């Protein structure tokens, strides 16, 4: 009998389990994937290989996106200790104050989910190697650093944004986000600091925590309306474990799936699948939000960037250099600069995020072409589009039906179009006009709003930031309350990105860890 069972050892689950164990609780962690032993996980540049390696990913796919070009897209999420924090691009981004203040509004006036309430959690998590002020921590378990060096291509791009009128911002996680910047990343000393590295590994040898990998949760166990444990399969055997409280931290695509398999979800949907309904929670799986990315690609006239470092003999040499000396291109992520801007209001809060990758990348960002170039990866920070996730059947091994519904709202398309036009302005700046050949994609022939819109709809895909499918709120329709307790059930919480009432204006990893830290605080207080 455990005090807590934590389902999922990703960005949130690793932190939750580690913190609870530190505080003396008896914890069982169930993770569907394996251990994080691959060198590619811990090597900062390894993420580009991980994103195309099925062993570390749930092989999910969306339904055909009729509002785009009718094609389905891959929607992969991390599997294994650390979850997506073990294979993402390590960009450490907090977002905007208004993001979290809207969480506060959703949670209710008596709750404490505002930016000011969450800032201490961001600081407690972080060990920033260069910044130590009211916005940053210096002694947390997640080390955050700036790029070890700047490629000449990124240096030219930073100058070009300034020439286009966007100021340099030394700290986009500080007082304001707007500007062109050097990326802050959760790696240091040539090592990724995933949630598992930061929170789970330091406690894994303690007697009060058990970490079971390759453990696929089938359903939650109940006595009446109280969660008492979990049924899962491992090594071909069906097992059960019991606890005083169950915490579901399986991520925005798997937490609602587990709730629905356990009878918590839309009554009509579950009844059709023959699942006994324990709680008619209509919003489980709804309100799916994600950042859709749309790239601009330009081939470089100079032999700049990292195009040679991920191919052939050079790739082998770089790998060996990393293994022997923890040095060279593999010791960094390659993502060295980004920008936050508002095409509609140059001084307003940013509506677009752009990462400047010094390589010609595929849609998955996992494969670089063997030619010099730059990929500007652009997202609308606060999309209005909403999707949903539903069960395919009652089989816990089946993939869910996922409809992210990206760019279904015309305002999202309009903002993306403005973002692409702004990047094109930057490409015409003095520092870049002789650096690139004519634009590769969407291409110089794509000029009108309709042509650009058609390109957006053909190129858009996930930025791997799904949230919102078990949203927190004060209303009865919300899935969890301000204490992250599942409505209609006892001794059951959800703590992960699925509880976000709205997506943050940022990569979601840092925010997920912060809300997990807040979730542990709520558990310990009660």
Image (cartoon, rainbow, N blue to C red):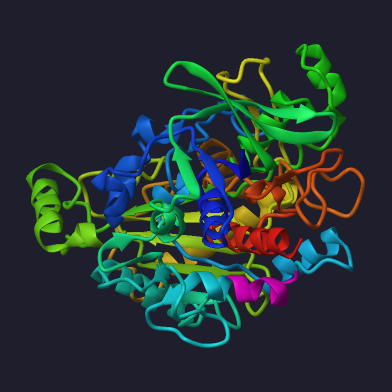
Q: Residue at point 75% right, 42% down?
A: 287
Give percent across and percent down for residue 206.
Answer: 43, 53
Q: Residue at point 11% right, 42% down?
A: 312
Quick check: 247 above or below 154? above
Foreground: 271 or 164? 271
Foreground: 498 or 440? 498
| Residue 118 painted magenta | yes
Foreground: 297 or 5? 5
Relative horizontal placement of residue 31, taking residue 526 as reference (left or right): left
For residue 367, say whether it is visible: no
Give percent across and percent down for residue 211.
Answer: 45, 42
Quick check: 350 above or below 204? below
Most extreme residue toward the bottom is 133
Quadrant holding the N terminus: top right
The overriding secondary structure of the stretch rendered in magenta is helix
Give percent across and percent down for residue 313.
Answer: 7, 45
Q: Residue at point 66% right, 18% down?
A: 392
Read off the magenta span. Answer: 114-121
């Amino acid at each position: 009998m455990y005090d807590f069972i934590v389902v999922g050892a990703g960005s949130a689950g690793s932190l939750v389990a580690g913190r609870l164990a530190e505080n003396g609780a008896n914890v069982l962690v169930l993770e569907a994937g394996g251990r994080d032993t691959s060198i590619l996980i811990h090597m900062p540049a390894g993420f580009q290989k991980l994103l195309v390696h099925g062993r570390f990913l749930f092989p999910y796919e969306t339904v055909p996106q009729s509002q785009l070009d009718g094609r389905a897209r891959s929607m992969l999420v991390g599997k294994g200790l650390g979850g997506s924090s073990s294979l993402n691009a390590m960009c450490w981004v907090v977002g905007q104050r208004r993001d979290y203040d809207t969480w506060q509004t959703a949670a209710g006036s008596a709750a404490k989910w505002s930016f000011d309430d969450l800032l201490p959690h961001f600081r407690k998590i972080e060990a920033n190697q260069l910044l130590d002020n009211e916005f940053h921590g210096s002694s947390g378990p997640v080390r955050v650093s700036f790029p070890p060096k700047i490629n000449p291509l990124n240096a030219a791009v930073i100058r070009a944004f300034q020439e286009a009128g966007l100021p340099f911002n030394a700290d986009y996680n500080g007082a304001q986000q707007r500007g062109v910047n050097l990326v802050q990343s959760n790696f240091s000393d040539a090592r990724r600091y995933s949630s598992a590295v930061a929170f789970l590994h330091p406690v894994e040898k303690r007697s009060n925590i058990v970490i079971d990998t390759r453990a696929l949760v089938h359903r939650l166990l109940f006595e009446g309306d109280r969660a008492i444990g979990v049924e899962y399969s491992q090594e071909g055997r069906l097992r059960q474990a019991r606890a005083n409280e169950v915490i579901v931290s399986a991520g925005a695509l798997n937490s609602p799936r587990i709730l629905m398999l356990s009878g918590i979800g839309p009554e009509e949907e579950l009844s059709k699948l023959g699942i006994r309904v324990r709680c008619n929670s209509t919003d489980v799986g709804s309100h799916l939000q994600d950042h859709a990315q749309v790239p601009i690609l330009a081939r470089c006239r100079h032999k700049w960037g990292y195009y040679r470092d991920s191919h052939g003999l050079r790739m082998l040499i770089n790998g060996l250099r990393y293994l022997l000396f923890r040095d060279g291109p593999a010791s960094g992520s390659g993502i060295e600069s980004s920008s936050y801007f508002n095409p509609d209001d140059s001084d307003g809060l940013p509506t677009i995020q752009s990462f400047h990758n010094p390589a010609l990348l595929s849609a998955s960002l996992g494969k670089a072409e063997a030619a010099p170039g730059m990929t500007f990866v652009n997202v609308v920070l606060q999309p209005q589009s909403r999707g949903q996730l539903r069960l395919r059947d009652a089989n816990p091994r089946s993939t869910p039906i996922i409809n992210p519904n990206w760019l279904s709202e015309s305002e999202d398309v309009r903002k993306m179009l403005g973002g692409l036009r702004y990047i094109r302005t930057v490409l015409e700046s003095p520092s870049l006009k002789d650096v690139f050949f004519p634009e590769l994609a969407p291409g110089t022939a794509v000029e009108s709003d309709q042509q650009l819109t058609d390109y957006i709809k053909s190129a858009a895909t996930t930025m791997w930031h799904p949230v919102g499918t078990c949203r927190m709120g004060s209303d009865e329709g919300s899935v969890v309350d301000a204490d992250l307790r599942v409505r209609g059930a006892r001794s059951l919480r959800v703590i992960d990105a699925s509880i976000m009432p709205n997506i943050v204006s940022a990569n979601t990893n840092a925010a997920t860890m912060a809300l997990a830290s807040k979730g542990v605080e709520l558990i310990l207080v009660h």
